[in-house]
Image: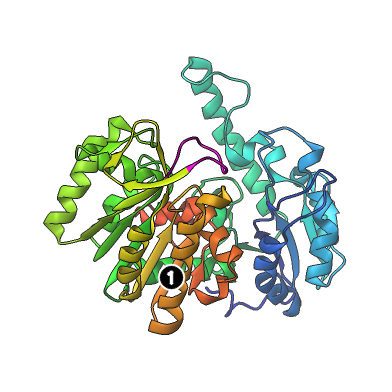
Amino acid sequence: MTIEEFNFAGKKAIVRVDFNVPLDENGKVTDETRIRGALPTLKKILADGGSVIMMSHMGKPKGKVNEKLSLGQIVGNVSNLLGVDVKFAKDCGNADAEAAALQPGEALLLENLRFYPEEEGKPVGVEKGTPEFDEAKKAMKESQVNFAKKLASYADVYVNDAFGTAHRRHASTAVIADYFDADSKMLGFLMEKEVTAIDSVLKNAQHPFTAIIGGSKVSSKLGVIQNLLDKVDNLIIGGGMGYTFIKAQGGKIGNSLHEDDLMPEALNVIAAAKEKGVNLSLSVATLCGKEFSNDTERKVFPINDIPDEWEGMDASEASLAEWKKIILSSKTILWNGPVGVFEFENFAHGTGEIAKYVAEATQINGAFSLVGGGDSVAAVNKFGLADKVSYVSTGGGAMLEAIEGKVLPGVAAIKG
């Protein structure tokens, strides 16, 4: 059952949203993007004549009540954007009365799910690796089921529209789905778009298909890289992770970030790319800094000949020229991770240029482009290019696990 087909008239729908929005020191929302993302789903339910119960986490309260992470602070924002006076339940685990009182066209927001340790299903205050931990974990699993059952009891229908948490088997993202039949649980519009966009890249990609994988560590992206080698024509590896590949091949990388223990894996990736006919493109030269700071002295060196006292911090113009050619000749593009120290203005140029190339390939050459991961998303937003790429993913971790070929519990709980 899809959300488009379903008629919510007279039904109570409990919707897992991602309202984990940034707040300032006064508890005011500084970016409403995530709330806006859920509006199509919420408005469809209300327009049909249903009522909506929204549930979300905020931050990491680790199973304890923390007023600084209370969703009560965002009720005004949600009300304004939804166009409905949103009610608030101060205890998500005991909201029977508030849920029962909901009338068609009304909306209720539950307090932070993670105030209950049962949401994440992690034992609190017990040391890992001890017999006590194993016992506590077993007991917690049962408690998590009961918590999910409680949440399910508030509504007739379950909708998951929180892609950012789809890779977690939490009470509200996966376990709850067991208490609704196949016709009474579905993905929200945002989740549907995310799943479709990832499927477009992984299952229906037009060629040439280029993946741009950046970021600081090979360890966090190794599974992604290995899975992509069977799918892509070009694999661009930039950012801090590139120096592990260079050092593995005998290059001098100075003080650049690297992972010695992953050099054998880097060599395996290089060999596998060659065997599969994948064009693996590493940086040819790098903009280096004397120190890890924005205002440090800067100089360009060949990627495999960086002096000891220097550290690679951004892609050079020579590397960008090479990558531009690859990106502009692509029909499918996947981008995750920056190619430099994006948080420093003086070393953000490379990542900004990649954003422009991906947008140009999409707008002028008709490529399908999927961008995900914090700094990649920040780059397309910073340069006003978010609407110039095909899709910007809201879930970095979930997107990475999907690209790695893992089953996402939040999707599987509904689609099987």
126 vs 78: above or below: above
Q: Is residue 395 magenta?
A: no
The quarter of the picture where residue 240 lies is: top left
Q: Is residue 188 visible?
A: no
Task: Name the residue rendered at 39%, 31% in the picture.
Answer: 309
Task: Name the residue rendered at 78%, 55% in the picture.
Answer: 29
Residue at the top extreme, as displayed = 131
Q: Is residue 41 left or right of residue 186?
A: right
Q: Secondary structure at mark 1?
A: helix
Boundaries of the magenta span: 288-297
Looking at the rendering, in which quadrant would you find the C terminus? bottom left
Residue at the left extreme, as displayed = 275
The quarter of the picture where residue 105 lies is: bottom right
Horizontal and vertical percent position of residue 241: 36, 44
Horizontal and vertical percent position of residue 10: 75, 74
220 vs 378: above or below: above
Q: Which residue is mark 1?
A: 358
Q: How is the image coloured?
A: rainbow
Q: Is residue 163 left or right of residue 14?
A: left
Amino acid type shown at disc 1: Val
Q: Is residue 293 magenta?
A: yes
Q: Is residue 387 left or right of residue 287?
A: right
Horizontal and vertical percent position of residue 178: 54, 53
The quarter of the picture where residue 188 lies is: bottom right
At label 1, counting other C-alpha atoms closer than 10 Å, the crowd grade (few under 14, some 14-19, many 20 or more) is many
